[in-house]
Image (spheres, grey):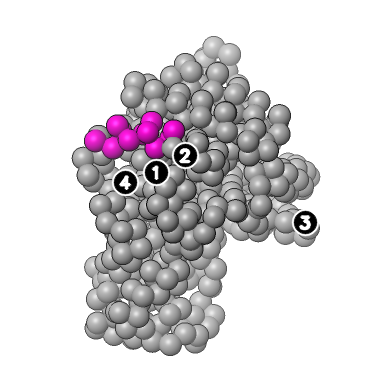
Amino acid sequence: MSDIQSDGGGCTEHGAVVTEDEAEALIRGICFKTGPPRALGVELEWLVHSLELPQLPVTPERLEAAYATVRTLPLASALTVEPGGQLELSSPPAASLTECVDTVSADLDAVRAALAGHGLGLAGLGHDPRHPPRRFLRAPRYDAMETCLDRTGPAGRHMMCSSASVQVCVDAGHEEPGPLGHTRRWWLAHQLGAVLVAAFANSPLAGLRRTGWRSTRQLKWMEIGPGRAGAPPLDGEPRAAWARHALDAPVMCVRRDDGPWEVPEGLTFREWTRSRSPRPPTRADLDYHLSTLFPPVRPRGHLELRMIDAQPGTDGWLVPLAVTAALFDDPQAAETAYRTVKPLAERALDRPAPHNPLWADAARHALADPELREAADGCFAAALEALPRLGATTRVVDAVADFRDRHVARGRCPADDLLDEGPPGDTRAHGRKDIRT
């Protein structure tokens, strides 16, 4: 959501009116920028909590003061704030995994130190285990988003205000076929995505209660519905499939330069281009519309993998970044990953992610599912073999190996650690640790 930047000022003043055919051509032209994979990026969302009293919500005034300090830092990564006050760091495109890790690590060190000066810390959790959704940001776009998402139930508010993730960005790939071809990578992202959901599930709690899902965050995305948070079918050419899906997706809002934004019900962008009501859509409206679609894999020239829960610990985020980079950008590992996850595709029943049985099982059972565990074993083994070829440091390789040994090899995920500890504040659980990182 952090790429939705307009706050309403001048929202209709740039860009010519677009027709249906022009909108489709524009989407097809910008969604997959093909070429050899050269760049890598990561977007890290974090919940922010009090270091001394994590059981209490942080007041808006305290968050404002802390973020005012953080915004003065000379960061290489873009810093944004999510609707519920979550903090997000988005790395610049990096030429290597090592460059990406070094850049983000330095920025995180600076941000953590600045927040600590205000008695605050970052929590690597996919969903807030304690507090109900509470909006921190007030702006026309978030008012409209809340109104729109409320029509499908409370899941939208949880997504906006209570969730956090690790989003890995990889290049779309070659135009030509093969392990690094864009068609193969598009397919792989949606099948491997279920394995990534399962391996890194880290949100089993909400309101101090077990939800029955290892990834409650993924459950909320599923509940938002396929029009807003679903993928297109995978049985067609990726550009055409995504353009069709985007045009047939519901418009979240019609922006205005003054007053509240209109939130139409059931109006797709395709229908908007035809009716030109309540006003004709512009190129700026199309760009904005694309930013209000939240599929598990979002094509933005590159591929943005959005399905991974935020991870615990100082370096927990390194592992999904490194594993994903290895499985996409090393040709040998990419081919192994493709063969490993291909048998899982039958469980999707030809339904787009995440609204199919494979993704639901990944979010609910994680690696307790034998087939997902076997696939994760194979993918982690391939990643560990590939990482030295990608120039990964010992720090990164050791982090991936440690995660494999502690979790994947035992059919566990970070959510299982949280379930073992018990809900936050429950001191009866053996070896209880408070959730602070």
Instruction: Give x and y (percent) for residue 394.
Output: 71, 29
Which label was assigned to residue 299? Answer: none
Which residue is at the front of the view, 41 or 286?
A: 41
Most common SS among magenta residues: helix
Question: Residue at (65%, 32%) from the top-left corner?
Answer: 388
Can residue 135 be spotted in the picture? no
What residue is pinned by disc 3? 73
- Give the alpha-carbon distance from disc 4 to disc 1, as whole Å: 12 Å
Disc with the residue nearer the chain's start (2 vs 3): 3
Q: Looking at the image, do the residues carrying marks 1 and 2 touch, with CB atoms under 8 Å apart? A: yes
Q: Is residue 217 above or below residue 289?
A: above
The amino acid marked with disc number 3 is: Leu
Q: Which mark is residue 353?
A: 4
In front here: 146 or 232? 232
| Res. 346 visible in picture | yes
Q: Which residue is mark 1?
A: 188
Q: CA distance from mark 4 to mark 3?
A: 38 Å
Q: Amino acid at mark 2?
A: Ala
Residue 130 point in image, percent of width and height: 50, 36
Residue corresponding to mark 2: 334
Vertical position of residue 204 compared to residue 69: above or below: above
- Provide the secondary structure element on which disc 3 rests: loop
